[in-house]
Image (tube, coloured by chain):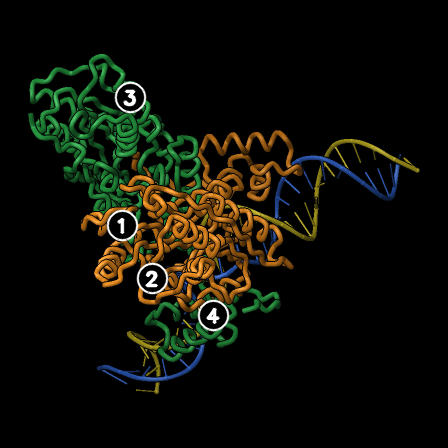
Chain colours: A orange, B green, C blue, D yellow
Amino acid sequence: MNGSHRMSKRITILDLAKRLNTTPSTISRALRDHPGVSKSLREAAKSLARELNYQPNSVASGLRKGKSYTIGIVVPHINRDFFSNVISGIEDIASDNGYKVMICQSHDNEEKEKQYINTLVSARVDGIIVSLGMNTEDCSHFEQVLNARIPLIFFDRVCEQMDVSRILNDDTEGSFKAVSHMIEMGYKRIAYFSGPEYLNVYRDRKNGYLKALQNNSIEVDKAIIVHHDLTQETGWKAAEKLMKMRNRPDAIFSSSDFAALGALLYLRENNVRIPEEVGIAGFSNEKFTSLVNPALTTVDQHSNEIGTFCAKQFLEEVELNNENYVPRKIILNPRLIIRESTKRIKE
Amino acid sequence: MNGSHRMSKRITILDLAKRLNTTPSTISRALRDHPGVSKSLREAAKSLARELNYQPNSVASGLRKGKSYTIGIVVPHINRDFFSNVISGIEDIASDNGYKVMICQSHDNEEKEKQYINTLVSARVDGIIVSLGMNTEDCSHFEQVLNARIPLIFFDRVCEQMDVSRILNDDTEGSFKAVSHMIEMGYKRIAYFSGPEYLNVYRDRKNGYLKALQNNSIEVDKAIIVHHDLTQETGWKAAEKLMKMRNRPDAIFSSSDFAALGALLYLRENNVRIPEEVGIAGFSNEKFTSLVNPALTTVDQHSNEIGTFCAKQFLEEVELNNENYVPRKIILNPRLIIRESTKRIKE
DNA sequence: CAAATATACTCAAACGTTTGTATAGTTTGA
DNA sequence: TCAAACTATACAAACGTTTGAGTATATTTG
């Protein structure tokens, strides 16, 4: 309550041992119900521990055992529904299995991502789960994770050169579904917002877009394929540019919900009717997509499942003790969610 | 690239020492530029470390120094804008000062919160920053943090009995502003969504509501004050109940944006015009509030600033080494954001 | 009844750092 | 020139736990 001000030394296993006239090793075993310790001592140790409010020092135990029971997670932003749902998924499985998670935000900054990887390796986490930052082109900072024989798992935005497990969506398929749907709704000239092409997700999503056009014999016009960093702001600006073209597009498909939102707001502000004049769709199924007006068609990525797959894959690899496991690629099938922003009466 | 399969033992300070024909202690000092070590050796040590890709073991160093350079954060949910912004704020300051953060989600579950506190104490974090779960009535699990002399800081939802620093909004004031505004807009019968009253924030917000009514000589009607867990779902249900009253309210003020959203969706679905027939406002300024239709009036809590205050307070307390510091209460003034959901033409 | 076997412990080393103290070797000063 | 002072390094203990090996006592076995 008031924090009594005796300089209480933290109590250790040695203190318990002294009080029970035995040794630290015996206490250590007693507390973990080792069968080699008599029942009576086990009980005594545990009740004394409770009484003195003993908290095991997991730093010491981590050092001795070479295991920290911690998983490091590095994502660009935790305040995106996609990432926070993945993290929730990881955390649920992890904590059921006695692991805690350490969450780091790279803020899409390669330097920060590198630092966090260093920190996690230094902290001797038992595994690292990563989705790359938007600006990460070079993957060399992950080499040391492999060298340290720490299980490494990527999801969503991955390092393709690295031979490690990865959990992915079929981004091509997701994009293909969305664009095919838009074509079916009668849109003829569909612009596309893409991210950096050294990242698998953006390359794949673009391929899905191209495939859908091709499939419907629509010619690709590079003028309406825009590359940017897919934020709300740049989405707004890109929409502005597109709408001022003489031959303006009648739809926008964005590989990010945030950029789609920016575009949507631009269109709304400029009284372009959605979906009648211009259709619009995004990617990721962020919460806000169902709430904007009109509600945004988007591609759901099963974020929570991705998280549980990541965690399960980690558990498997850690179990195998880094020996002869084969990296695995798990691909989920994304789901198209059709909402008002593309529901045009077919012409 | 392919993870060469020699069972490479991790290299330690001892390995470096052997190669340079010196001792671990000297290497340890050399790597940290201790002036007692000759310049040449310092350089040699550092370049060898780089060459061999030496990664210091922060577990060992943590054990020896009794410091982990880690801050534990416990929040109900990381996928709420309010919390993730606070975390971002903490993390920015923390990482500038060499601290990493460990983020835990209590999911508003008291048991889970307790476990996480245990884990963090065991992990010997250097500080713990908490916002209580919705269901946490009993704060006894925080006693051990104090006993272990680990700086403890609360924000938003706090343990009032505990004499530790806390960063808060003036929730009464926030609520008062919102409700006063609604009254000014001509709403006469304003319902209220409240959370559990053992939590400071909900008690304070309710007080602000009551104060605003009183201030305008509006009688309080307990029939339209609803207590629930403030999720989108319960907000929906509560709105339904209220709208079916014979003497139904003409406005709803919710102490959570999520519950306000639920209510808004119910009203929209049932063709109750907002803000004409019923006004509505929430609390927290979640991203979606500006995007729903109509946009939701809400109270902004300066989430990012709360985070930086938390981190700075932690740094100060850790600096003082737990000696004679006086717990501090920092109160920020929330900001009312008026949007369409309450902009009724005054009658 | 001696020998084998269980039982319930104790001992000591180890994990990888850090840090206070000791010890060479070198320089300085009167 | 010899003690004092400094420089650069070595030594050893410590952080708190875990674990393999060792030991004393009690119990079983042929």
Tags 2 and 1 both on a single chain: yes
Read off the chain for label 1: A
Left or right of B210, for residue A310 = right
Residue linked to disc 3: B227
Tags 3 and 1 both on a single chain: no
| Foreground disc of the pair 4, 3 | 3
| Foreground disc of the pair 2, 1 | 1
Local SS, label 2: loop
Q: Earlier in the sequence, mark 4 or mark 3?
A: 4
Q: Real-space Cα distance between discs 2 and 4?
A: 23 Å
Estimate the x, y position of residue A157 in percent, counting from the top left. 44, 58
* For the residues bearing labels 2 and 3, Cβ distance under 8 angstroms: no
* For the residues bearing labels 4 and 1, Cβ distance under 8 angstroms: no
The quarter of the rendered structure image containing the N terminus of chain A is: top left
Please tell me in which quadrant of the rendered image residue B35 appears. bottom left
Please tell me in which quadrant of the rendered image residue B303 appears. top left
Q: On screen, A274 above or below B174?
A: below
Left or right of B260, for residue A101 = right
Q: Real-space Cα distance between discs 3 and 1?
A: 45 Å
Residue linked to disc 2: A109
Residue linked to disc 1: A277
Classed neighbour count for the residue bearing mark 3: other residues with Cα under 10 Å, few (<14), some (14–19), many (≥20): some
Q: Earlier in the sequence, mark 2 or mark 1?
A: 2
Q: Residue at x 23, y 14 (%)?
A: B223
Q: Real-space Cα distance between discs 4 and 3?
A: 58 Å
Q: Residue B53's mark?
A: 4
Classed neighbour count for the residue bearing mark 4: other residues with Cα under 10 Å, few (<14), some (14–19), many (≥20): few
Instruction: In the displayed orientation, state which residue is furthest to the top.
Output: B246
| Foreground disc of the pair 3, 1 | 1
Q: Real-space Cα distance between discs 4 and 1?
A: 58 Å
**Foreground pick, B260 / B48:** B260
